[in-house]
Image (cartoon, rainbow, N blue to C red):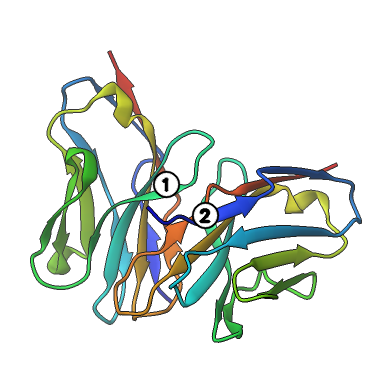
Amino acid sequence: AQSVTQLGSHVSVSEGALVLLRCNYSSSVPPYLFWYVQYPNQGLQLLLKYTTGATLVKGINGFEAEFKKSETSFHLTKPSAHMSDAAEYFCAVTFSGNTPLVFGKGTRLSVIA
Amino acid sequence: EPEVTQTPSHQVTQMGQEVILRCVPISNHLYFYWYRQILGQKVEFLVSFYNNEISEKSEIFDDQFSVERPDGSNFTLKIRSTKLEDSAMYFCASRPQGRGTEAFFGQGTRLTVV
């Protein structure tokens, strides 16, 4: 069965520092990978996605992620954290066009002034 | 911009009562989903719905749960005889046709069973 592992339930960075949120997946077939963000008391908003093609994908708010097949990873990065980035981040995967997303447990990002 | 809307935003119900959570997916989407998120935990898949029938469901989605698309626009989740452990945020999502398309989520309904 497909699964997603997010290392670190809580990551804390200083404002202006690099953000790195880790995501690994298990799959025997090519995955479609997503990062969603959840601000307090809100729904899930898509940050970025990988389907096919370029392995480095850029999303909203300056975030990007790189699909590394050899490492089965899809880590999320942002060069410089902003206070407004504080939120819960979820990595998700699906393995065909229409199967439901499987989510990781989420990583709470705190940004310290 | 089109969005998925859910009502109510918060529902409090007594244990044993039935609740219906409502969702209006994006109009040209074909795949519909319900997920739940127990406080502080991961987002869990409940059920997917396509072509007016359930296409997949998780082990969480037992006989207590049912889904309907009664009128071509609304998509509802019914929970019969609610239990305390049903307290969670319930998210509706919809997705257009096509490989790798993302799911669009509603703002969620917070269900509190007392």
> Which residue is drawn at the image coordinates 42% and 47% (left, top)?
A106
The secondary element bearing badge 1 is classed as loop
All told, the count of numbered labels is: 2
Residue type at mark 2 is Val
Res B73 → quadrant: bottom right
Res B104 → quadrant: bottom left
Q: Say which of B112 and A69 sits in front.
A: B112
Q: Say which of B5 and B49 sits in front.
A: B5
> Which residue is drawn at the image coordinates 89% and 46% (left, top)?
B14
The secondary element bearing badge 2 is classed as strand
Q: Which residue is mark 2?
A: B43
On screen, A101 above or below B1? below
On screen, B114 above or below A12? below
Res A80 → quadrant: top left
Q: Say which of B52 and A4 sits in front.
A: B52
Say whether marks 1 and 2 touch (CB < 8 Å).
Answer: yes
Where residue B17 appears, as percent x and y from the top left, is: 90, 56
